[in-house]
Image: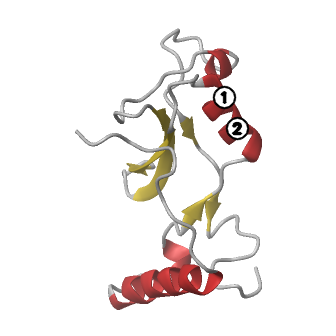
Amino acid sequence: MKEFDASAGEYIPASKSKELIDNTHKEKAKRGLRKDDYTHSQFFGKDKLESLLRDAGPDCVGIRINFILEGEKNDELGALIQAVDKNGNVLHPAKQMMKTMSSGDGGGGLYGGPKCPRTCLPPPDGGPN
């Protein structure tokens, strides 16, 4: 198995980011979906992300973003962010999660950040909110 690398990913220019987002919206429109009808993105705060990485310990090399289905009918896209080691194993840091959970099995990851289109500043297309 290839190791996960702490330097994985690449920075792209704003123009490429816009192109990727625009292409996604165009493809979804071809499928009959309107921007107001699907989740474009989800926000997670800096404090929570830093805490997840810090509390995962020295074996943490990065995060995995799991795209999940949720909602009453499992028809809404969401994200679950987990800390992982160099082999892609999920790390379950207990410290940050013990404040909010009583399960005792450590943290599973970050979940439940606000979603767009309901909460977007600025909105994905750059237009008025």
- Position of 66 relative to 101 (above/below): below
User: Could you tell me which residue is drawn at 57 percent across and 68 percent down?
Assistant: 11
Q: Which residue is mark 1?
A: 54
- Which residue is more in the foreground, 64 or 1? 1
Q: Quadrant of the N terminus?
A: top left
Classed neighbour count for the residue bearing mark 1: other residues with Cα under 10 Å, few (<14), some (14–19), many (≥20): some
Inspect the image, locate mark 1, and give the three-letter code of the amino acid beneath it: Arg
User: Could you tell me which residue is drawn at 54 percent across and 23 percent down?
Assistant: 107
Give the quarter of the image for residue 123: bottom right
Inspect the image, locate mark 2, and give the three-letter code of the amino acid beneath it: Glu
Q: Quick check: 71 left or right of 44?
A: left
For numbered disc 2, what is the local secondary structure? helix
Mark pair 2, 1: CA separation: 6 Å
User: Could you tell me which residue is drawn at 52 percent across and 80 percent down?
Assistant: 21
Q: Which residue is mark 2?
A: 50
Classed neighbour count for the residue bearing mark 2: other residues with Cα under 10 Å, few (<14), some (14–19), many (≥20): few
For numbered disc 1, what is the local secondary structure? helix
Residue 2 coordinates in the image, percent (x, y): 27, 43
Q: Quadrant of the C terminus?
A: bottom right
Residue 115 coordinates in the image, percent (x, y): 61, 59
Give the quarter of the image for residue 116: bottom right
- Which residue is more in the foreground, 31 or 67? 67
Assess whether mark 1 and mark 2 are in contact (beta carbons under 8 angstroms): yes
- Position of 43 relative to 3 (above/below): below
Residue 48 coordinates in the image, percent (x, y): 70, 38
* Numbered label tally: 2
User: Could you tell me which residue is drawn at 36 percent across and 36 percent down?
Assistant: 88
Q: Quick check: 29 left or right of 114?
A: left
- Residue 84, numbered circle: none
